[in-house]
Image (cartoon, helix red, strand yellow):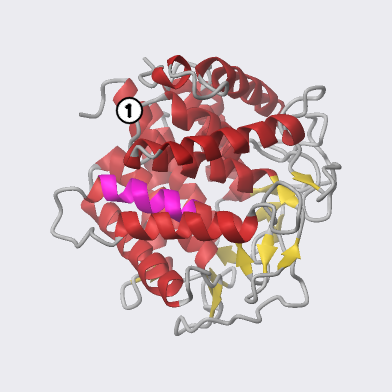
Amino acid sequence: MRTNSDLDASGKTIYGEEFLLAQALSLINFAKGSVAINGGFGYLDSDGSVNSDMPREAYVQCRMTQIFGLAHLLGLSDSKDLVDYGVESLLQLFQDASYGGFFNAIANDDLAIAGDKLAYDHMFVLLAASTAKAVGSSQADQLFAIIDGIIDQYFWDEEYSLMKNGWSQDFSHLYGYRGINANMHAVEALSAAYDVTGNEKFRDRAYRICRRAVDEFARKNDWFLPEHFNQEWVPDLEFNVDNPADKFCPYGVTIGHLLEWSRLTLQIEIHMAGSSEDLSWMKPAAIDLYATARKSGWAIDGTDGFVYTIGWDGKPIVRSRMHWVVAEAAMTAFTLWKITGDDAYLLDHNQYWQFISDHHIDKVAGSWHHEISPDYQVSEGTWSGKPDVYHAFNACLLPLYSLDATFIGTALMVNGAKD
């Protein structure tokens, strides 16, 4: 049962339950086209068909498994079979039978094309496994135990309270690069794992990562969060200066990540209530991160929309408007509204959804255009096609239900499985 019906009744937004629910259902239907004939979930083209020229990527398998699991638990779609399918694809296709862990991507001949073992992928496997456990997928416990062990053995760094970033395929060589992106998704996955298992190891690690990233790295840099570091976690501010539009490791400040960290900080505070940890920094830091992202990213080049990245001088670097950034902005603004009661955040939320409706939602082929140019034309400078619906679907769900620390926590609450 949805409990935020006041979103419509208040008259403060047209982007209430009816609109968001319709969008969520449309996105789930679009995502179902990703089932690949050779196993797993394929990379979706703009028209919703699988692009056979693209590899199947681990993070896509996991994101699809997550959204199908949430849809099933919330009664939006009978999609438990797709959750089972996602778990099986991770175990049978993406798991490295020789060295352990999970491949980044596999080709159509089912051979690994990227053998490095990346924290980013493994954090999403944990998220998928946690979701599958909540759904009751038959192989979920097996997948969860495997990924929990791999993260403990190879990625969690107790000394730094952060995740290491990447290993060679056989786990014999740890690369020196450290990244904040994988750690952000670690917070998401660890929080979900805590909601499913009740094991405080996951909750406490999520908090420790968040505190380092937000209360240390971001605060010390005037909320311009560094993304790239060396093995001692010293920021490398010039990383990828020659490849500024990288999908996962762009140069400079990634505006969408400031927004995402803001929301995660607020939601982790929910988990940590009653703990002995100092929580006084969390809400103010989340507010500052959001304010920095809006001031430095929205319409900074003279036209509406969030730019992808800015330089350390605050000037735009990559001006493309990415769908995931404005989706995160909508979620963060709504979360801040619910927690603070300040209607200014609801006005922001409405503005972002107006932008999404005007420019990102593909009203012909379905789903959302992943990237548009500063003059609002569909573009593919960084992203081609519509590979997944994870950010968009979650942005639709968040306002529909009582706010909790994670999406899976919300789904369990709806099902009466969480107090």
Location of residue 2 in the rendering, given as x and y in whole percent from the top left corner: 39, 18
The answer to whether 135 is drawn above or below residue 329 in the figure is above
Magenta range is 260-270
Instruction: Pick whichever, 324 or 293, lies toward us.
Output: 293
Q: Is residue 344 left or right of residue 22?
A: left
Location of residue 185 in the rendering, given as x and y in whole percent from the top left corner: 48, 54
Q: Which residue is mark 1?
A: 412
Position of the N terminus by quadrant:
top left
Mark 1 Cα shell of 10 Å, populated few (<14), some (14-19), many (≥20): many
Location of residue 104 in the rendering, given as x and y in whole percent from the top left corner: 63, 57
Residue 216 sits in quarter: bottom left
Q: Is residue 48 left or right of residue 201?
A: right
Location of residue 167 in the rendering, given as x and y in whole percent from the top left corner: 55, 72
Taking the magenta stretch, the answer to whether it contains residue 109 is no
Position of the C terminus by quadrant:
top left
What residue sits 62% from the left and 33% below the top? 353
The overriding secondary structure of the stretch rendered in magenta is: helix
Taking the magenta stretch, the answer to whether it contains residue 265 is yes
Q: Is residue 97 visible?
A: no
Instruction: Pick whichever, 11 or 204, lies toward us.
Output: 11
Amino acid at circle 1: Leu
